[in-house]
Amino acid sequence: MAKKINKESTLSSNIYRRSSSQECKVFPSGMVEQVLVQLAKHFSYPIELQVYLTGSSKNRINQVVVPEFIIGLGNRGEEEYSLKDMDYLGEFDGETKTMLAVLQETNELGIQVVAYAEKFNRDKNLFVPLSELVLDRPLVNYLPEDSIQELFPEKDVSEITNDHLSNLILTSNSLRKCTHSYFKKTIETVTFLIDYPLYVDLFTTLGSLKVMKGYLLNSLIPVNNKFMGGKSHGMAHIHYGYSEEQYEKSTFLQECHKIDEHFNELISPGDAVGLISRNHYLKLLSKGLVDSYEWFIGVTTLDPVNKDLIGSTYFHTAEIYMNKKDAEEFERLAIMSSQITDYSWMRDYYQIVRQYSSSKLPDYVDSII
């Protein structure tokens, strides 16, 4: 197995290659549903997506901050990628670097994800072939412009094909390359360009996502989020509806539907656990630079086929945490329901979430489009 790669060589300051002052892709907060719908429709495969809601002034949330460089994982037939156990993406306590790569046995182009954290005995590695990536642009466009110019000085970006990328990795003798072996049924070896990291704001699948630190911190640092002095923000993300066939095959979905016909428009137990974790780790992650609390979570539910809007709700985090008893019960039920399928817990969980959820944006958020 590959040994741990030196942190400085693997995870340099070029991971995000974005300064804290770089402008983000921003829309009016009242457009949050439209933004999520249109973002989803950019991708051929249904993947979960997330945006932050922040303020350009102290008194109001008035903008949606949208991730630009999204890498989806999917297209594996019946088997779905899951990010729930992918701690190597290092959302809070590590660093992540994503690079162009080729699987030597097949010459297939893809990406190599390498993550580092102090708690790891060795770097965590993941190779995903291009055939299983869900992208909204050619892979070359995830490279920073200066990298493209350095690697292909005589080509316009529109002329660079996936074959050009593969051939560059396989044939170049002047570029620093690394290899990693995966011990599966057969040994698979991946070669990747360690000095040319890709832009990545978000890794995502059909049912889970991981926000990368560059997008998270650039969205929420006080210079870009002035709401309540940078102390508060909102988040909204996508759920997908279920087909009649999925309901027929799943006792779990049937029972959840009995509890609340529109349960999929509410934050799930997994969403709630993520909320609890984020509110704990965000200040630690940023070394005190960001001390912002998630005042609400939006869920925009879409049809998985045509990506049209089904419905939305907004869970009022700030409101429930004003009631200590309800907050403690909410956290207890969220943790238990995310770990064990017990329909009495699920019933109580969705009841308390419904109590603190609304179909409208909170009154401190501008809803004008």
Image: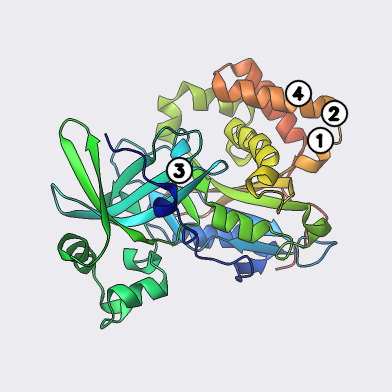
Q: Which amino acid, by three-letter code, is at mark 1? A: Tyr
Q: Which quarter of the figure has residue 32? A: bottom right
Q: Amino acid at mark 3?
A: Tyr
**Label 3, residues with CA under 10 Å away: few <14, some 14-19, many ≥20:** many
Residue 140 vertical position relative to residue 3 in the rendered view, above or below: below
CA–CA distance between discs 2 and 3?
A: 37 Å
Give the label on residue 116, or none. 3
User: Closer to the observer: label 3 or label 1?
Assistant: 3
Residue beneath disc 1: 321
Q: Quadrant of the C terminus?
A: bottom right
Disc nearer the start of the sequence (3/1): 3
Q: Quadrant of the N terminus?
A: top left
Left or right? Give the position of 191 relative to 22.
Answer: left
Tell me the SS state at disc 4. helix
How far apart are the two marked residues, 4 and 2, measured between alpha carbons?
9 Å
At numbered mark 2, what does the secondary structure look like: helix, strand or loop?
helix
The residue drawn where x is 78% and y is 62% is 226
